[in-house]
Amino acid sequence: MANPNMKHPQNVAGSWYCTDPDDDNGEGCIACNVCYTGAPDFFEEDEDGNAFVKKQPESEEDKELCMEQLEACPVGSIGFDG
Ligand code: SF4
């Protein structure tokens, strides 16, 4: 589960987030590019290739797409608060 206390500072406000690469629980982004390739409308890479949420999903279809990225993230770096 992504650590809600280690959110990437560039996440747009809202329930979906990516965690900071410095998360010492080992769940920080490793810049694998899965999420911002799979759902580029919602995830973007920062200058180091680490992901943040640039737009919150609203429709069920968009939430489903983001959930697919959450499940595909190899380090559990994507989360949502509900
Ligand atoms: S899928 Fe996970 S590890 Fe890969 S870029 Fe996105 S948040 Fe980072």
Image (cartoon, rainbow, N blue to C red):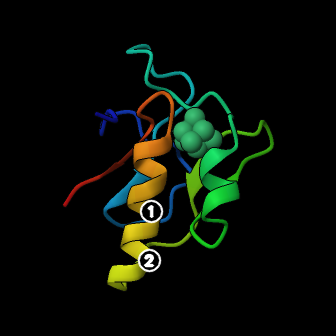
Q: Position of residue 38 (x, y in %)?
A: 63, 59
- In this rendering, the answer to whether 76 lies above or below 82 is above
Q: Nearer the viewer, residue 24 or 34?
A: 34
Q: CA distance from mark 2 to mark 1?
A: 6 Å
Residue extending farthest to the bottom is 59
Q: Quadrant of residue 80?
A: bottom left
Estimate the x, y position of residue 40 in percent, counting from the top left. Answer: 67, 66
| Residue at the (51%, 43%) spot, across then down | 8
**Residue 71 located left or right of residue 34:** left
Q: Residue furthest right?
A: 47
Q: Amino acid at mark 1?
A: Cys
Q: Quadrant of the N terminus?
A: top left
In-front residue for pair 3/31: 31
Direction left: furthest residue: 82
Q: Give above or below for 58 relative to 7.
A: below
As drawn, is 7 to the left or to the right of 15?
right
- Identified by mark 2, the residue type is Asp
Quadrant where the image shows the C terminus: bottom left
Q: How many marks?
A: 2
Asked whether the beta carbons under mark 2 and mark 1 sit within 8 Å of each other, the answer is yes
Q: Which mark is residue 66?
A: 1
Where's residue 58, x and y in %?
37, 82
Which quarter of the rendered image does ligand 1 occupy?
top right
Residue at 64 percent of width and 46 percent of height: 34
Query: Which percent across, then down, holds residue 39?
Result: 60, 64
